[in-house]
Image: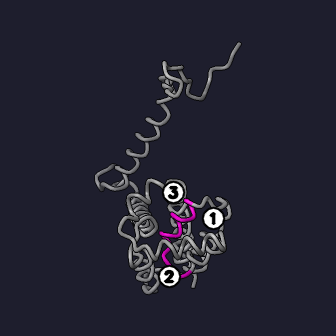
Amino acid sequence: MRRPRKHPRYILARHRFERTVTLREDALYKPFLVTFALLLISMIIVFPTSIFDQTIPGVMAVLRQLVGWMSLSAVATLFVLPVSVFDIELIRIFSDSARYSDLTVGGIILFAVFADTLFASVGYRFTRTLRNLFMRKVKRRTVEVSNVRLQKYGNIGMFIFAVTPLPFTAAIYTAGALRLNRLGFLVAVSSARLIKYCA
């Protein structure tokens, strides 16, 4: 008994270089279900009209705060901005010692490191698409500096870009274009962000 194929099956076309991809119907179920579940969860968190706001209002408030921080991290990591909006928010949090305890600040730092590493990974993975969208108006000198340093130092250079005020976003897209070692890239970004936010 033959197992069903998991990969798309190619049908030979008339011309040698043309290929038509056919997908099984059940191959679309999983992406649709995941998309629907994510949409449902985001609607519950973002809009304060669900039944959960009456039963667990404190948990919903925390989830909304985490979603807000995730969006700030996404903007700061994937968009080329002169100042990181996420850094401004974290400075505001760290200066409010009456509201946030040391343990809470430690949790926020770990979450910020996780969010920045996650979106840096997204930028690394989809470099070509995101670079065309967000790097059009970036100065050529900025791109050249990140290109030269990452070619010379590799993921050590990525660590320096992530821990200092150097253009972090340009370095992410350059690392993706150069195809630096992915594990080394993630370790460099996460450790550098941890040091930066703790400092």
Mark 2 or mark 1, which is nearer the start of the sequence?
Answer: 2
Mark 1 or mark 3, which is nearer the start of the sequence?
Answer: 3
Residue 42 percent coordinates (x, y)? 38, 51
Q: Identify the residue under disc 2.
A: 165
Query: Which residue is at the far left?
Result: 49
Looking at the rendering, the stretch of residues picked out in magenta corresponds to: 164-177
* Residue at horizontal 48 percent and vertical 76 percent from the top: 167
Q: Identify the residue under disc 1.
A: 185
Mark 1 to mark 2: distance in Å? 18 Å
Label 2's element? loop
Label 1's element? helix
Q: Which quarter of the figure is the N terminus placed in?
A: top right
Q: Identify the residue under disc 3.
A: 122
Q: Are marks 3 and 2 in contact (CB under 8 Å)?
A: no
Q: Amino acid at mark 2?
A: Pro
Image quadrant assignment for residue 46: bottom left
Q: Which quarter of the figure is the C terminus placed in?
A: bottom right
The answer to whether residue 154 shows anywhere in this view is: yes
Residue 99 percent coordinates (x, y)? 43, 81
Q: Residues within 10 Å of mark 1 (few under 14, many from 20)?
A: many
Q: Residues within 10 Å of mark 2 (few under 14, many from 20)?
A: few
The foreground one among 136 and 94 is: 136
Q: Amino acid at mark 3?
A: Val
